[in-house]
Image (cartoon, rainbow, N blue to C red):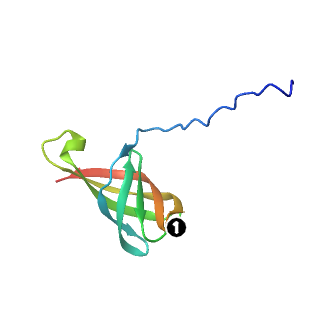
Amino acid sequence: MDPGVTTPVASPVELRAAVRFPLCIPITVSTPEGQVDAMTVNISANGVLFELAQPVDVGSSVSFTIQMPAEAMGTPSDVLANCSGRVVRCASVKSRWQVAAMIDKYYFGH
């Protein structure tokens, strides 16, 4: 290989099963340690990324209800999504914790 020639390096490709929507909504997350206030960062059909003041163990079960704004859902009124799942990632970001949770079950309420 000629040392004067550079080979382009492929950028990592992010493969996701569902589109993420940047949506900041306050929620209360139920964890094995109790209930904690959090703010969503983004949401997809498969999971949610939220920020909170304390870490949550990877693998922990979580449940939460998200009040999805009517404008975001294209509905005449807000939609409540009751979700349960598990934590798949937890990382410290700027003195807060970002927690990614896979949604295993959800149902819509009023």
Q: What is the tally of numbered marks visible in this picture?
A: 1
Q: For this rendering, which residue is in front, 41 or 15?
A: 41
| Residue at the (86%, 28%) spot, across then down | 3
| Residue at the (47%, 60%) spot, across then down | 98
Q: Which residue is mark 1?
A: 57
Work out which quarter of the rendered image holds the N terminus and state it: top right
In the figure, is residue 51 to the left or right of 12?
left
Report which quarter residue 32 is drawn in: bottom left
* Above/below status of 58 relative to 10: below
Report which quarter residue 75 is drawn in: top left
* Above/below status of 52 relative to 79: below
| Residue at the (41%, 38%) spot, across then down | 19
Position in image of residue 70 (x %, y %):
18, 45
* Above/below status of 77 relative to 36: above
The three-letter code of the residue at mark 1 reads Asp
Report which quarter residue 6 is drawn in: top right
Q: Residue furthest front?
A: 4
In the figure, is residue 68 to the left or right of 3?
left
- For mark 1, does the 10 Å Cα neighbourhood hold few (<14), some (14 to 19), or many (20 or more) residues? some
Position in image of residue 21 (x %, y %):
36, 43
Work out which quarter of the rendered image holds the C terminus and state it: bottom left
Q: Residue furthest left?
A: 76
* Above/below status of 91 relative to 81: below
Q: Secondary structure at mark 1?
A: loop
In the figure, is residue 16 to the left or right of 24?
right
Q: For this rendering, which residue is in front, 102 or 51?
A: 51
Position in image of residue 29 (x %, y %):
36, 65
